[in-house]
Image: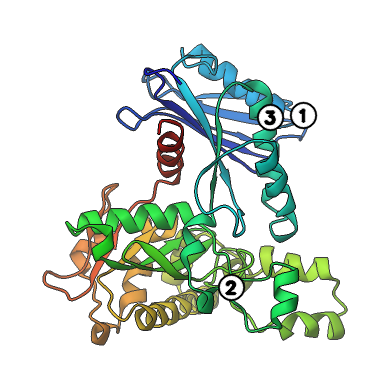
Amino acid sequence: MTATATRVLVLNSGSSSLKYQLLDMHDAARLAVGLVERIGEETSRLVHTPLATGGAKRETEGAMADHAAALKAVAAELAADGLGLDSPQLAAIGHRVVHGGLKFTEPTVIDDAVLTEIERLVPVAPLHNPANITGIRTARALRPDLPQVAVFDTAFHTTMPEHAARYAIDVATADAHRIRRYGFHGTSHAYVSRKTAALLGKDPSEVNVIVLHLGNGASASAVAGGRCVDTSMGLTPLEGLVMGTRSGDIDPAVTFHLKRVAGMSEDEVDELLNKKSGLIGLCGDNDMREIRRRIDAGGEDGARAQLAFDIYIHRLKKYLGAYTAVLGRVDAVAFTAGVGENAAPVREAAIAGLAQMGMAVDADRNAVRSDEPRLISPEGSRVAVAVVPTDEELEIAQQTYALVSA
């Protein structure tokens, strides 16, 4: 890597999508961002925004048969802005990889052995790791000379003690099939817990934080002195909070009941719990803005939306109480991601009634909309309540650049 190579391309590969950002780590500036949708379908769509040049957003449509075609199209868009993948200023490509198991606890330069291990983890991440692997292979084929780095969603949570990570099932069976709690959204929890400490003017080692990452997927973490000691997602991203389309915590016997009584197959139960549950299963909407609109409109439809909202909040309160007990001392609660950053009613309702735990929300502060980290708790509160916008792409870029420039 040359001294002038300070750019990192971050790739987040989904089954039919490719999100990307190009950043210059000299000053953490975003040079370009974009998204390719509907890869493999009849008409794919690429949305590209050249931030470095201040140019207008560009949208193109056309058939992109696979991720290789999508990445080539992305490379062409970047080249048109003078930011091509052949630039000597490109230091590395950082890949979001959802599941790293117990082996990958840090960002890792990808070689054939690493890729093989990521493939071995497909059975515990069948919806995510295959797409991540496709993105890695595509990028390696385009730039085989460039360091490719995997940053794992699970890595931040590998500091959980065994008593938090283990399920209470037969140990031999669990070990044979790698059944344990891994946790996800780790790059977000790492970034937000660190930013929360900075907001309080402290080092992360001095602060205990409960992070609530509330998007369509949602998770909570208990972070003690910069280290995760518990998190709500488990073997898969299905466990924990009520989410947009996922049930979160549920009695495992529900799955047996549905198979025996309703005659549902394993795939049907899987689809029910992952894609037809959570908010969308409760009220038909997984957009919190629409749910709040329906509540405000009232009537029978509003009552259904209100029940979904109440169930969502009830689960949040349970985790706030549980993680307060796990940490012993809580210095801050941080709301982040799409719902956490933008839905003031969610933040207000989640904290309401928790004054005995030292948690409160100031209505005026909570109503403020901003892209900056900010406190929404009253002055002098024992526990700081904050809104801290997450930046998973920046976290991936920072971890990638730190590794390749060391």
Label 3 packing within 10 angstroms: few (<14), some (14-19), many (20+)? some
Task: Name the N-terminal-most of marks 3 and 1.
Answer: 1
Q: For the residues labelled 3 and 1, say whether their Cβ atoms are less than 8 Å apart.
A: no
Q: Position of residue 315 (x, y in %)?
A: 48, 78
Q: Residue at x 23, y 54 (%)?
A: 198
Task: Name the N-terminal-most of marks 3 and 2.
Answer: 3
In the rendered image, the vertical position of residue 89 relative to residue 342, given as above or below? above
- The Cα–Cα distance between marks 3 and 1, rounded to whole angstroms, is 13 Å
- At mark 2, the secondary structure is loop
**Three-letter code for the amino acid on which mark 3 is drawn:** Thr
**Would you say 164 lies left or right of 7 here?**
right
**Three-letter code for the amino acid on which mark 2 is drawn:** Gly
Q: Nearer the viewer, mark 3 or mark 2?
A: 3
Way the structure is coloured? rainbow
The single residue placed furthest to the left in the displayed view is 380
Label 2 packing within 10 angstroms: few (<14), some (14-19), many (20+)? many
